Amino acid sequence: MLGGAGFHPYRAKARPGRDTRRVQPKIMGIVNVTPDSFADGGQFLDAERAIAHGRELSAEGADVLDIGGESTRPGAEAVTAEEELARVAPVVDALVRGDGPPVSIDTSKLAVAEAALNAGAVMVNDVTALRAEPDLAGLCAQRGCEVVLMHMLGDPRTMQENPVYDDVVDDVKAFLAERIEFAVAQGIDEERIWIDPGIGFGKTVEHNLELHRRLGELAALGHPIVFGSSRKSFIGKLTGAEVHERLGGSIASNVIAYDNGAEMLRVHDVAPMRQALTVVEAILDPARAQAASQPG
Ligand code: HH2
């Protein structure tokens, strides 16, 4: 069943004002099949390598695999639906089989999402929040899949030029509220909607940091939060670290996001993030830590 078996039980029921601290964090492992992704560009362009990488992330404990065939890096070139589909189709086909975690398709294109859902993906992760191809909303409604609505100011080619907000958190929240309303009006089940502040998408370093600090304010929208800061450029700007040297910063960012209410963390480095979260959870939830320390 699409959107059901093995996936839905992971998420908490959406309800306004809930305390998300006790919700076990889920890890979304990133599988990019692109020549130009900012963090792993070209490395997994070859389908076989992307499949092997997805299997590694599964073995490391990913709860979801997010497969993407178009880079959204600042200044990245757009790709056609045909090209994107050719990149991701064999990878989705392979990773939905077997006993791996559920598959999410990272796309803004109806044709790509449709093919991935037909193949067995259960989640559509759209960085344009159903703005690029609004008919994608109807498809998601019809299929009953999970949907991630992400905030972005501008588009990937222009978004980092000079982002300006009245108040970044209020503006992101208002945007997401409007996109939730649109999605529901198109027939998407409220219970299937996830929201994402879009770290790095039309934001300065300070905007990104403010969104970490005040992430809890987005929980008032009543939907689980996806958070994607892994290896992003604000970490490089703060620390001087190159893209492959940003694990420490990525862990710090994700731990804070989790503590402030994020329920799904979209990351490149699944095993170290899993380890960090296990320790954080034990500290924040002594009951769970105590149970784990009992003999047997
Ligand atoms: N970030 C990227 C892509 N997709 N989806 C969500 N929901 N949230 C994010 O923050 C997010 C996303 C960009 O990261 P990456 O996939 O590593 O790079 P690229 O877009 O260059 O492939």
Image (cartoon, rainbow, N blue to C red):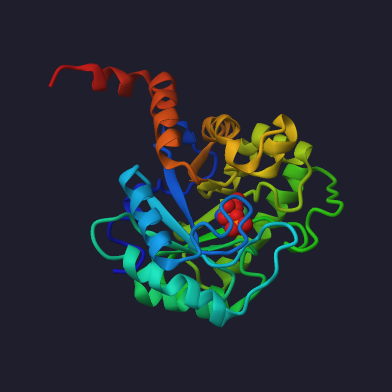
> Is residue 63 visible in this depiction of the protein?
no
Is residue 52 rendered to the left or right of residue 104?
A: left
**Residue positioned 74% across, 36% down in the render:** 237
Vertical placement of residue 45 versus 58, above or below: below
**Residue positioned 67% across, 55% down in the render:** 151
Is residue 293 rendered to the left or right of residue 122?
A: left
Residue furthest to the left in view is 296
> Is residue 228 visible in this depiction of the protein?
yes
Q: Quadrant of residue 274?
A: top left
Q: Quadrant of residue 41?
A: bottom right
Locate the C terminus and report the quarter of the image it occupies: top left
Q: Could you say where residue 261 lies in the image, as x and y percent from the top left?
A: 53, 36
Q: Could you say where residue 214 lies in the image, as x and y percent from the top left?
A: 67, 35
Vertical placement of residue 96 versus 213, above or below: below
Q: Quadrant of residue 183?
A: bottom right
Q: How many marks?
A: 0
Q: Could you say where residue 146 lies in the image, as x and y percent from the top left?
A: 45, 62
Is residue 25 rendered to the left or right of residue 58?
A: right
Locate the N terminus and report the quarter of the image it occupies: bottom left
**Residue positioned 35% across, 74% down in the render:** 119
**Residue positioned 43% across, 34% down in the render:** 272
Q: Could you say where residue 31 lies in the image, as x and y percent from the top left?
A: 47, 57
Vertical placement of residue 185 versus 179, above or below: below
User: Where ligand 1 lies, by quadrant?
Assistant: bottom right
